[in-house]
Image (spheres, rainbow, N blue to C red):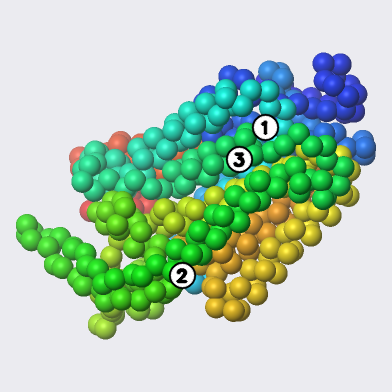
Amino acid sequence: MGSYQLIKENINPHLQGNKCTLRIEGKDDVESALSELDSSSSPTLGRNAASRCITSASGTTRLVSLDIFRGLTVALMILVDNAGGFFPAINHSPWNGLTLADFVMPFFLFMVGVSLGLAYKNLTCRGAASKKAMLRALKLLTLGVFLQGGYFHGINDLTYGVDMYQIRWMGILQRIAIAYFLAAACEIWLRNDDKVNSELSLLKKYQRQWVVVLILTALYLLLLYGLYVPDWEYQIPIEASSSAKVYSVKCGVRGDTGPACNAVGMIDRKILGIRHLYRRPIYARTKQCSINSPDYGPLPPDAPSWCQAPFDPEGILSTVMATVSCLIGLQYGHIIVHFKDHKTRLLQWFVKSCCLVGLAVICDISGMHINKVLYSFSYMCFTTGAAGILFAAIYIMVDVYGYRRLIVVLEWMGKHALMIFILVACNVVPLILQGFYWGQPHNNILTSIGIGAQG
């Protein structure tokens, strides 16, 4: 990455005034699309001499606290992915509720938004910027389908390839790509040239982006609570047979937010097709579907018919609300761009974050439950507010007080988040290790140390 040096006020003669600017030319790599991993610019330098921005030998500037926040989220992702099976309490909530694992996705989306606010603060050509954003999103979509569409058959199976009749179209990277592109398009096209000197003028400058936030939220709520969900059915192949068992799910309701009859699942079944959805639904860990709840386990004798039905946690309608998380993160990035004083930035971040958390609690109490799988409105508010609070805390520690030495590993992880995600979260490393075996495929490095199924 090149050597790094501290840049303080008025040191670099190539910069105008006190500002560190971001160069986005030539950053067409896929990594820049995930949270704009290599496109984080620093804010305008604060009046406090402790305000810092880091620049590489190539001239690209970065907001260190954003890298560390991203690295912390990557570490959290690794923790819950590997320890969630042993400690179900930190694994994703089976349905309503919130656990440690449920913060990972919205944290990434929030950081995508913050990064975009910094990356496009000095926009010169909207057409070229739009083209780059579209290419980055397409690269990330393609990578997501390849890694999460079923091409790799998983742990303890050395075969590969995917049946196009059953490929999974949606996934984590696909959701980030969609949110990234929509947020980038808003930042490129939906802002005016007004000067910002107060919170009101900031709102006025980006008022059309807030209109998009309201439209997407209204669309999500209208479809979730307004669509009629009819009865439906699905099939499960019978082992050692060419036939399949058909399960019927009775619905005939409107506005239901349970596992079986919600509009999120219905839209995915209608548009994507039930064969193209995630086949290990999170609600299989609910008490109705597992005797080991909140962990996976055998079905109870009276298990409902929907327990084994495919359901995509990164579906179409839920991605609409996920995009709102990204757009709100974008507004946090605007605060960095337009306000130089640490106190002003922190005050605005904390006020907005606390309001979001408070609104989420009110909605949850009122019956609009916090639900990661549906990406409910209350879930979006709570996790985005939590992201804002954590980001502000890291900003105080890193960019205000310059405390970095003991968290340099998190900074490195934040700069290489996509690579780590591919190698660890997408099981690329386990697949590579299992490719080296003796005698039989199940006699590999991982099974010899007790990881994976034996025999």
Compare residues 450 and 180 and report the one nearer the observer: 180
- Is there any visible trace of residue 299 in the rendered image? no
Label 3 Cα neighbours within 10 Å, binned few <14 / some 14-19 / many ≥20: some
Whole-angstrom CA distance, mark 1 to mark 3, is 13 Å
Of discs 2 and 1, which sits in the foreground? 2
Q: Earlier in the sequence, mark 1 or mark 3?
A: 1
Q: Quadrant of residue 189?
A: top right
Whole-angstrom CA distance, mark 2 to mark 3, is 27 Å
The numbered mark at residue 186 is 3
Q: Amino acid at mark 1?
A: Ala
The numbered mark at residue 448 is none
Residue 394 falls left or right of residue 455: right
Compare residues 401 and 126 and report the one nearer the observer: 126
Q: Amino acid at mark 2?
A: Tyr
Quarter of the image with the N terminus is top right
At a point 68% along the width and 59% down the height, the residue shown is 385
The secondary structure type at the circle numbered 3 is: helix
* For residue 52, above or below residue 361: above
Q: Quadrant of residue 444?
A: top left
Q: Which residue is mark 2?
A: 225
At a point 48% along the width and 35% down the height, the residue shown is 137
Q: Amino acid at mark 3?
A: Cys
Q: Residue 257, position in %: x, y?
A: 44, 72
At a point 18% along the width and 63% down the height, the residue shown is 235
* For residue 158, above or below residue 85: above
Q: Residue 383, position in %: x, y?
A: 62, 60
The secondary structure type at the circle numbered 1 is: helix
* For residue 170, above or below residue 9: below
Residue 299 falls left or right of residue 87: left
The numbered mark at residue 119 is 1
Whole-angstrom CA distance, mark 2 to mark 1, is 37 Å
